[in-house]
Image (cartoon, rainbow, N blue to C red):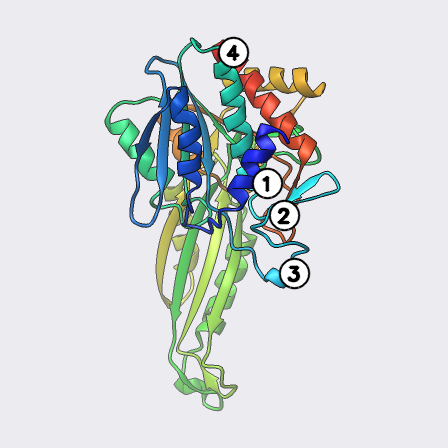
Amino acid sequence: MTESLSLLKELIRRESVTPNDAGCQNLLAKRLTPLGFCDERMNFSDTQNVWLRRGQNPPLFVFLGHTDVVPPGPLTAWDSPPFEPTLREGKLYGRGTADMKGGIAAFITAVERFIAKHPDHKGSIAIMLTSDEEGIATHGVVKMVEILQQRQEKIDWCLVGEPSSDQKIGDVIRVGRRGSLCAKLTVFGIQGHVAYPDLAENPIHSFAPALKELTEETWDHGNEFFPPTRLQVSNINGGTGAENIIPGQLEIQFNLRFCTELDEAIIKTRTQAILDKYDFKYDLQWRLSGNPFLTSQGELIDATHTAIKSICGFETLDDTGGGTSDGRFIAPTGAQVIELGPVNASIHKINEHIDLQDLETLSQIYQQILLNLLA
């Protein structure tokens, strides 16, 4: 059994459903402190965070990850228990194998091998881990970054071990992500009997034209790195459940995944302008999950392309697809940020898994990136 596989199995056995860490960070800190890493805990509320750093000199290379996982869903739907790592036909099954304990195991063992061969490497290496990525992400990396900035601890390069690969390890790296802006809209009407609509005001009817315009709006045309911005409605709730009552209010939740052609303020202004065209009363609450970010060039991308070519024998694709990641909290500091991790086909699914050879290949790529930058 390889070191990466052994470590991953230990991590999977820990039922770290968000925001619980279940001892994962203690396990990893115990492995790294004998190698010269300082173990600093930055816990907030129910979230466990750890900052493990070796060295004080620049440049600072950071591996970023999360030890929390999404709930497994119905246990009877799994072919084997989700928190009992199970090998079948060259794959390891368990919740978190791909998202993202596989990435963590790979970069921990890569760091161990790299330091064994290069104990006096250039710069510094750090591991940043949180248990608050799969949740609302309010007490995790965002809080850690605040602390680092307060003491002027600057990250130069950050590699997020999220499952970025598409068909095979290393075929895609994320060099940026779209922003995510969430909204909760309440439209107010007047409740009444459906037989007497003149005595009521139906908020569903009032909002319908605005909904059409919002969803058909051309927010932008995207650019060479990002697709066009889109608004998607996720929830609409109105009515009492009775078929003869006009509802008194309507609640709508929607989200915009936006590119670098827009910002939060522009979206809010344009949305309100559309709503104000129509004759209804409303309340609109916003939550910014993250701004878009992009690392279009730099030493980290060059080192990663070279490493993948060396280990895998092919050129990787730079991409900005997918959802958000904790990289959105690192990029505003000026750091170069990319995401490179396992194949994402089974993430958040029943029978989540990782190919054993992929795990080893990923660890080798991580080690080569360290060699390219810090040896």
Amino acid type of the residue tagged 2 in the rendering:
Glu
Few, some or many residues within 10 Å of mark 1 (<14, 14–19, 20+): many
Few, some or many residues within 10 Å of mark 3 (<14, 14–19, 20+): few
Secondary structure of residue under mark 4: helix
Badge 2 is on which residue? 352
What mark, if any, has residue 117 been given in the picture? 4
Amino acid type of the residue tagged 3 in the rendering:
Ala
If you read the primary sequence from the N terminus, does the residue marked by circle 2 or circle 3 appear first? 3
Few, some or many residues within 10 Å of mark 4 (<14, 14–19, 20+): few
Horizontal and vertical percent position of residue 303 = 55, 15
If you read the primary sequence from the N terminus, does the residue marked by circle 2 or circle 4 appear first? 4
The answer to whether residue 267 shows anywhere in this view is yes
What mark, if any, has residue 98 been given in the picture? 1
What mark, if any, has residue 319 been given in the picture? none
If you read the primary sequence from the N terminus, does the residue marked by circle 3 or circle 1 appear first? 3
Measure the alpha-carbon separation of dots 3 and 4.
Answer: 44 Å
Q: Nearer the viewer, residue 210 or 373?
A: 373
Horizontal and vertical percent position of residue 275 = 42, 59
Callouts 3 and 1 close, C-beta under 8 Å: no
Measure the alpha-carbon separation of dots 3 and 1.
Answer: 18 Å
If you read the primary sequence from the N terminus, does the residue marked by circle 2 or circle 1 appear first? 1
Measure the alpha-carbon separation of dots 2 and 3.
Answer: 12 Å
Few, some or many residues within 10 Å of mark 2 (<14, 14–19, 20+): many
Amino acid type of the residue tagged 4 in the rendering:
Lys
Q: Residue at x 55, y 44 (%)?
A: 96
If you read the primary sequence from the N terminus, does the residue marked by circle 1 or circle 4 appear first? 1
What mark, if any, has residue 77 been given in the picture? 3
**Which of labels 1 and 4 is toward the front?**
4
Name the image quarter holding residue 226: top right
